[in-house]
Amino acid sequence: MSRIPRERTKTLGKRSGKLGRASREAAPVEPLNIVHGALPSREVILRFIAEHPQKASKRELAKAFGLKGDSRVELKHMLRGLEQEGMLQKTRKSLIRPGALPPVTVLDITTRDKDGELIGRPAEWPEDQGVAPAVAIRQTSPAGRQGKGKTPVAGMGDRVVAKIFPAADRGGPAYTARIIKIIDKRRGATMGVFRTAPGGAGRLLPIERRGEEMLIDPDYTGDAKDGDLVEVEIARLGRFGLPRAKVLSVVGSVASEKAISMIAIHAHGIPHVFPQPVIDEALAARPATMSHREDWRDVPLITIDPADAKDHDDAVYAEEDPSPDNPGGVIITVAIADVSYYVRSNSALDREALKRGNSVYFPDRVVPMLPERISNDLCSLKEGVDRPALAVRMVFSKEGRKAGHTFHRIMMKSAAKLSYSNAQAAIDGKPDDKTGPMLEPILKPLWHAYEVIKRGRERRQPLELDMPERKILLKPDGTVDRVFVPPRLDAHKLIEEMMIQANVCAAETLEKKRQVLIYRVHDGPTLAKQEILRQFLATLGISLAKGGNVRANSFNGILAKAENTPHQTMVNEMVLRSQSQAIYSPENIGHFGLNLMKYAHFTSPIRRYADLIVHRALVGSLGLGEGGITPEEEAALDDIAAEISTFERRAMAAERETVDRLVAHHLSTRVGEEFKGRVSGVTKSGLFVALPDYGADGFVPISTLGTDYFIYDEAHQALSGERTGLGYRLGDDVTVKLAEAIPLAGALRFEMISEGRNMPTAVRSFHKAGRRDNRQARKAAGTRPPRGRR
């Protein structure tokens, strides 16, 4: 959390620095002096936002200070100025101090203070903002008041959704929190690698960096063998010596790469075993009836998915619009599996789905949000089988402008199950026995419709980053076969754009019905990130306009300038790093990357809980029968959005770490070999080098780069030798030698083989000034450059 300067401590009543007890008592917090109807000072605004985060929108601020007319306009200009200076940061429709916690936050309870009170920290916290702030957990209502319900009682290791308040006691954590809901209760189990010890005993080596080694008595080793990945529970904690544990289950040999995804599942607390009541409820489900449904079984909807897909939750169909009022127009139908019919609010299935938030995809397994009876059977749009669905029928003009849309609850029968590759092959003139008869009546109209809506996309100009997605292909025994980049086909783009349009329709319909919902929102880049990108682009002779009104097409212009140049990859990476994280929210701020004002996830209710909420909202607001959203759900959307946003980031981290471990395991037998790579990151402590052929990153410590003294230049994203002027820059192609591979940590360490290159003139000028300043500073201090950092 950012601190207010010490000289303002008394004025603003904020904690600053490490004040002793006497100092704290000598500087009491002064009450906030609000003059109703008068424009407050900048300092009063900042303090009010810090103390009342729940009232930090422009509207609430104007209301709190009684501002009207011209005063509201002046307040708007003041807030904009504070944003541009980096003193405030916009999040959804509210304002927070940079590094401050939002009013509702997901916390992990990690420790206790000296008085035994629980302390939590945000479950997700940006690395560039330093250490996450501590939050004191309040287990009772404030001042003894009784809340609407009993406050949940949490314990060590729990993950909770909490209401955040600035701390009144400036000597402790910066925040206090009242628990709204416990997401995941602590488990008594942990995971590690079993190693045999003398006398039949064992030792548990932790798989987490902060884990603790444990002893396992001979009677408690179970069937574990040396090198097995095991799950244990703590059997005894003593005041001295290592904790003692008991083996609960053997996951498998750590030498088998199929065990590696289980490490991520455990490390991130991802629920992966369905409780029996959930399984029983899924097995008891019966096929949907025709009640409140239109019969669309004669509409030739088809599914187009990856060749290895096991569930199919979306189907498409397109035709020319017969209306004489829309010459050249098309009608596109998107049908989505009707999960809301089977998964009802507050059922066992629903509670487990919310606990998971989304499905998690690993190279060797999928951890589904819903049991297979639902996801792979009743809600999978199987070829030739009756299946319930929610469908949206969209009409577009020949220019790609949407003329209207309607939603329908239907019974459908998929005409065909196709893969991206065989659908594309048919369009490219190589149909097979299955796609041949479908080419004229189904596939060509779909591709024509895509060409129509693509005109609208080109006019909209969403952010077009060129970041190829790599896929790991495993052998039958679970070992890595190869890493490759799947081809990006028009079939992929067709389905993607039709799903985007369906998502837009869902948001528009629910807004028109004044139905609360969960949006998929993506804020624009912060001013601080824009400035970092601007400085970097300036070193390449590419400009980025200043100001807070940057649009997606501004970045597209930058990407176009870098296309087919040596800087293309690093410019794409830097633009990607400048972007904000997309999240779920009941408050709409639009989607910056897609350049859309109204957007909600609707097209994947099998694997995303947000989509299930949108389905329920559509069913309820349009009067389409059973399974609509409930008042209780509507009241909890803030909490649900915070939870599923956190779970999404959890899944992404687990998937990324598993790939890192798989590749590290795959390369662990090749230590000492040389590889072609590319500098993917530059830091003060060294270089990150990506191996494009393996989809992996490794680190080159700055101390191993050579005998020169290397200087970090953030603006140019470079490390440059002070004496030689040779160095390395983001995007450079290099050759490295693998020095170390640590499979369990997913870590690779490289040694640089390539010589540094001459830095551009601008970089050398920067370092010339830097060397002069360094020499003067060292002369004044009587020191030399440290030998270790060369």
Image: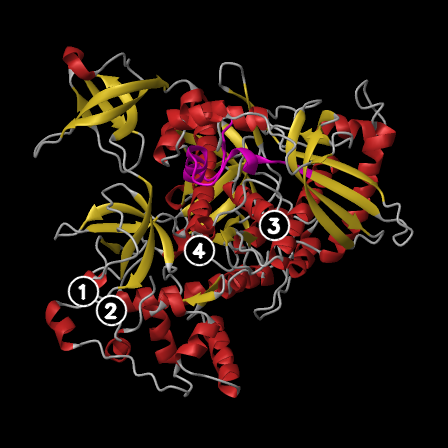
Mark 3 → mark 4, Cα distance in angstroms: 21 Å
Q: Residue furthest front?
A: 291
Q: Amino acid at mark 1?
A: Gly
- Residue annotated with mark 3: 572
**Residue 410 placement: quadrant:** top right
547 is higher (above) or lower (below) than 754: below
Q: Earlier in the sequence, mark 3 or mark 4?
A: 3
CB atoms at circles 2 and 1 under 8 Å apart?
yes
Residue at 33 percent across and 67 percent down: it is 777
Residue 712 disc label: 4
Which element type, helix, strand or loop, lies under badge 2?
A: loop
Number of on-image labels: 4
The mark that comes first in sequence, 2 or 1, is 2
- Work out how far the residue at label 2 is from the one at label 1, CA to CA, in angstroms: 8 Å
Give the Cα distance between marks 2 and 4: 33 Å
Q: Amino acid at mark 3?
A: Asn
- The residues colored magenta run 335-363
Residue drawn at x 67%, y 51% as measured from the top left: 505
Q: Disc 2 marks which amino acid?
A: Arg
Left or right placement of residue 541 versus residue 75 in this view: right
Residue sticking out furthest to the left: 239
Q: Secondary structure at mark 3?
A: helix
Q: From the viewer's perspective, is residue 469 above or below residue 105?
A: above
Q: Look at the numbered discs 2 and 3 and tell me whether their residues touch, using CB distance below 8 Å.
A: no
Instruction: Tell me which residue sits at (56%, 35%) in the image.
Output: 341
Q: Position of residue 374 (x, y in %)?
A: 53, 28
Residue under label 1: 171
Badge 2 is on which residue?
A: 15
**CA distance separating discs 1 and 4:** 37 Å
Name the N-terminal-most of marks 1 and 4.
Answer: 1
